[in-house]
Amino acid sequence: MSSVPAHGDVDVAVVGSLNMDLTVRVRRHPRPGETVSGSALTLSAGGKGANQAVAAARLGARTAMIGRVGNDAHADTLLDSLTADTVDTTHTVRDTEAPTGTALITVADSGENHIIVSAGANAHVSSVDIDAARALLASARVVSLVLEIPVDTVVAAARAARSSARIVLNLSPVTELPTTVLALADPLIVNEHEARELLRSHGITGERGPGQAGGLLGLGVRSAVVTLGADGAAIAEADRVQHIPGLRVDVADTTGAGDAFTAALAWRLSRGDTLADAARYAIHVSAYSVGRAGAQPSYPTADVLAAGGSPMISPSS
Ligand code: RIB
């Protein structure tokens, strides 16, 4: 890429977190105060931001990652993993004050996970980083914003990108944002639990799925997507609300499936797909991901997906 990139040089720029995922599998999650035995510890590249960047790049997007890691061995692994997947790391800064972010993850036999994040360097991503990445952001067709970094930074990134890029906002975890920033989300993406929390906090009611997606438009967003696990997703745009059916899969590990969904959606939107078509594709990608262990290790390439993806996938009834 030249030093002054042109608009369209980057398909998806992700502003968000990078973590080293420390994962142990357990038969079932422990109750409060209980100790359970787990599998051997595995370390893999994660963080909602980096997961999106890698997932989009594997599908064919020209992708860039804006965020921070520490100056430690975990940072080397995370940067190597991004580079191996051709993600532009020019604006993935090494922070000298804080360690690389870490996520402590347990995955039960059901595939359900519990995650505790220690933010580390992610907490230092600031408007200074956004200013430094201004030319890169201006070159992106889609800018995807992740809420595992300071809210002020997300706000600065949204404002920096609003005139040149479509903004995809995954509000996970649910965080209060200025209405002027919510108004830029196209779409706002949340899962059904996050949708319920968000709608309740704004005094809006909506039935699971389409009702929730339609309700989210009441927050002023341009469009909304509510992910529904095996039941697919509900999407809402100004003129209609739609349910996109899901895929039944044997669930191995749901870690990072939402990030794969958002990345795939962002990639397809950057190519000009409709929201409904992009969501159909994203459901396929996230279904592939839940059939395999880990976040980034579970993401498919475009070739794998085109070759039929996982034999475990079948349309849900
Ligand atoms: O969404 C999954 C991700 O959440 C993990 O990779 C972990 O790092 C946390 O950020």
Image (tube, helix red, strand yellow):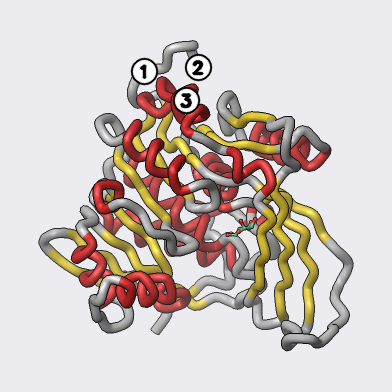
Q: In percent of the image, x 52 and y 71: which residue is there?
A: 313
113 sits left or right of 238 in the view:
right
Q: In percent of the image, x 20 and y 57: which residue is there?
A: 220
Residue 110: image location, x then y, percent:
66, 82
Residue 88 falls in which quadrant of the image?
top right
Within-10-Å neighbours for mark 3: few <14, some 14–19, many 20+: some
Q: Are marks 3 and 1 in contact (CB under 8 Å)?
A: no
Q: Is mark 1 within 8 Å of ligand 1?
A: no
**Mark 3 lies on residue:** 133
Marked residue nearer the N-terminal end (1 or 2): 2
Q: In percent of the image, x 56 and y 52: which residue is there?
A: 48
Residue 227: image location, x then y, percent:
40, 69
**Mark 2 lies on residue:** 1
Query: Can residue 156 be seen in this snapshot?
Result: yes
Asked which secondary structure carries label 3, the reply is loop
**Mark 1 lies on residue:** 6
Residue 205: image location, x then y, percent:
24, 80
Q: Amino acid at mark 3?
A: Ala
Q: Amino acid at mark 1?
A: Ala
Query: Can residue 303 be seen in this snapshot?
Result: no
4 sits left or right of 222 in the view:
right
Marked residue nearer the N-terminal end (3 or 1): 1
